[in-house]
Image (cartoon, rainbow, N blue to C red):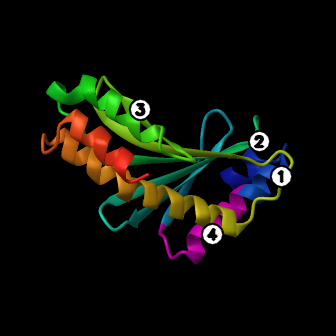
């Protein structure tokens, strides 16, 4: 038995969900690698190129809470002079999202996109995993370019917020 099989011996549903994630990533043609984490969760990493960015998709299955989390770090950060205002920009974007959210770390200026699905009473299929990948890359392309332009000083916070509002 390998590490991934051992991690899910207590929860065969989690093993099935993790296998579905790996299969979906394989069917999308994404190179991936997997790992077992110290807390008993398992993670699959895959790289993807969206319309605007090279991205790393990180799927984690947490059998303790029956959830799948997709985290996608954005490939840029806010420079120090923009860090306080970048938090307001992320809040403005999150008000426009119907699924998932952007997170922001003011310490280092890094941005992430996060989506979570619960599999407690549901079957998770490849189609849902593909949809998570699509939605994440779509929202990152749509709003990530705006966040990057803001962080580069191309637009003001007011212009950024107005632009986010106009597109909704």
Mark 4 lies on a secondary structure that is: helix
**Circle 3 is placed at which residue position?**
91
Image position, residue 65 (x, y; %): 75, 35
Q: Are marks 1 and 2 in contact (CB under 8 Å)?
A: yes
**Circle 4 is placed at which residue position?**
24
**Sequence-first disc among 3 and 4:** 4
- Is the N terminus in the top left, top right, bottom left or bottom right quadrant? bottom right
Q: Quadrant of residue 39?
A: top right
Which of the pair 76/19 is nearer the observer? Answer: 76
Q: Are marks 2 and 3 in contact (CB under 8 Å)?
A: no
**Sequence-first disc among 3 and 1:** 1
Image position, residue 60 (x, y; %): 61, 46
- Mark 3 vs mark 1: in front: 3
**Circle 1 is placed at which residue position?**
13
Q: Residues within 10 Å of mark 3 (few under 14, many from 20)?
A: some
Count the marks: how many? 4
**Circle 2 is placed at which residue position?**
66
Alpha carbons under labels 2 and 4: distance apart: 19 Å
Mark 2 lies on a secondary structure that is: loop
**Sequence-first disc among 2 and 4:** 4
């Amino acid at each position: 038995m390998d590490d991934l099989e051992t991690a899910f011996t207590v929860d065969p549903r989690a093993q099935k969900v993790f296998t579905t994630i790996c299969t979906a990533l394989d069917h999308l043609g994404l190179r991936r690698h997997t790992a077992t984490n110290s807390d008993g969760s398992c993670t699959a990493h895959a790289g993807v190129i969206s319309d605007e960015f090279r991205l790393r998709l990180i799927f984690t299955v947490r059998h303790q809470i029956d959830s799948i989390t997709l985290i996608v770090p954005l490939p840029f950060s806010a420079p120090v002079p923009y860090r306080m205002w970048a938090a307001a920009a992320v809040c403005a974007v999150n008000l426009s999202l119907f699924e998932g959210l952007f997170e922001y770390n003011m310490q280092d200026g890094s941005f992430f996109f996060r989506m979570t699905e619960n599999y407690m009473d549901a079957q998770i299929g490849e189609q849902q995993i593909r949809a998570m990948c699509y939605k994440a890359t779509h929202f990152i392309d749509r709003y990530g370019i705006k966040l990057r332009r803001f962080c580069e000083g191309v637009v003001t916070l007011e212009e950024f917020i107005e632009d986010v509002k106009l597109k909704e």
